[in-house]
Amino acid sequence: MMGRETAVALLLATACGDTSNTTAGADGTETQAGTTDTSAGTAGDPTGGVSDSETGTPTTSAGSNSGDSDTATTTTTGDTTTTSTTAPTTETGPDTTTTTTAPGTTTEDTTTTTTGDTTTTGDTTMGVDDTGLSSTTADTGSTTSTSEPDTTTGDLPCGSVLKATIRDFAFAHPDFENYGGNTAYKGLVEEDLGPDEKPVYAHPGPTPQTSGPDAFAQWYNDVPGVNHTFQIDLPLTEVQPGLYQFADNTFFPVDGLGFGNEGQPNNFAFTTEIHTTFFYNGGEVFTFIGDDDVWVFINGKLALDLGGLHPQLMDSVDLDDSANALGITPGMSYSLDVFHAERHTNQSNFRIDTTIACFVPM
């Protein structure tokens, strides 16, 4: 009887199922009670308790306000080598920097940073650096260039060298070595420069300082057999802020040239002619110190008159004070013409002091 009851009980248990040793998991799977799952990992085992198995990590896609960045990472545990490859392109704003990491290279973190505008100085360089990464930089933003500006005033280039024409004469010329004096003899030339940009002799015949108009006409013109012509530079130096100077108290630019020194230690018989243009800002002064004859014309008008044979003398013109007489206005450019003569064997001084800062190179 007991054997039959036992058999019936076993039959019922088999038909209905025994739930005493089985629990249902949250994901719908069943776990046998009393069984320990070691697949979650064992402390101290870097493989997480799985031997020679692969754990797949899904691809992560992360977006940003400046572009899209995709990173694909595959991690193999066990005997397999870990390989991480960064293949995508990261774009930031309108300016693009492209960085490509060669396949098979392990990269921890890759950060690409670009800033707003790109400043380009010179040519864009493309090449491969010593890490084996190919990089290309493109100028796609705003370009900033820097250049050294020319020194100009208005539309005029400014210079500091005056070009001068020297004409050498023989002592036998009637206007050289035949006169003397201790002061300036004013009025030898007209107030207005001639149409040929030469001084106009103001007298019909001789004066106490000249032999007449025909001989004077040779002073600043090339006359074969009468004079020899040379070109020289007269550099102006800024001797103090805003003051420019050429000074030579032994001004003998043609020693041994032309007709030569003619028995003298220096060649004393010559004339000097300068033509230039300057920019008038306002407030300028032009000063000449020297011997012998000197005439300075500004805008074709006689501004300084130190004619005649004399020792070293000085005269100045304040351009603002003489603006009406000279017909000049600040902010404009005007001609400046200087005529000088060294006519006696004594001394030769030639000095210009001026606050005119802008002479146009001729």
Image (spheres, rainbow, N blue to C red):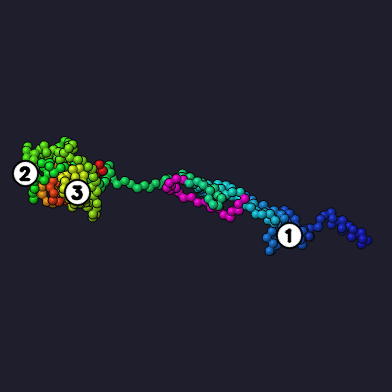
Q: Which residues are magenta?
A: 104-124
Q: Position of residue 71 (x, y in %)?
A: 59, 50
Lower position in the chain sequence, tag 2 or tag 1:
1
Q: Position of residue 303 (x, y in %)?
A: 14, 45
Amino acid tagged 2: Pro
Q: Secondary structure at mark 3?
A: loop
**Of tags 2 and 1, which is closer to the observer?**
2
Residue at the spot 24% in from the left edge and 48% down from the top edge? 235
Residue at the spot 23% in from the left edge and 55% down from the top edge? 240
Q: Residue furthest right?
A: 1
**Of tags 1 and 3, which is closer to the observer?**
3
- Is residue 107 magenta-colored? yes
Q: Are the residues at dot 1 and dot 3 in contact (C-beta closer than 8 Å)?
A: no
Residue hosting label 2: 208
Q: Residue furthest top?
A: 195
Residue hosting label 3: 252
Lower position in the chain sequence, tag 3 or tag 2:
2
Residue hosting label 1: 37
Q: Secondary structure at mark 2?
A: loop
Q: Would residue 139 be found to the left or right of residue 40 on screen?
A: left
Compared with 196, 151 (above or below) is below
Q: Give how far apart the Cα atoms at labels 1 and 3 are.
A: 113 Å
Classify residue 48 by image quadrant.
bottom right
Amino acid tagged 3: Phe
Q: Give how far apart the Cα atoms at labels 3 and 2 are.
A: 26 Å
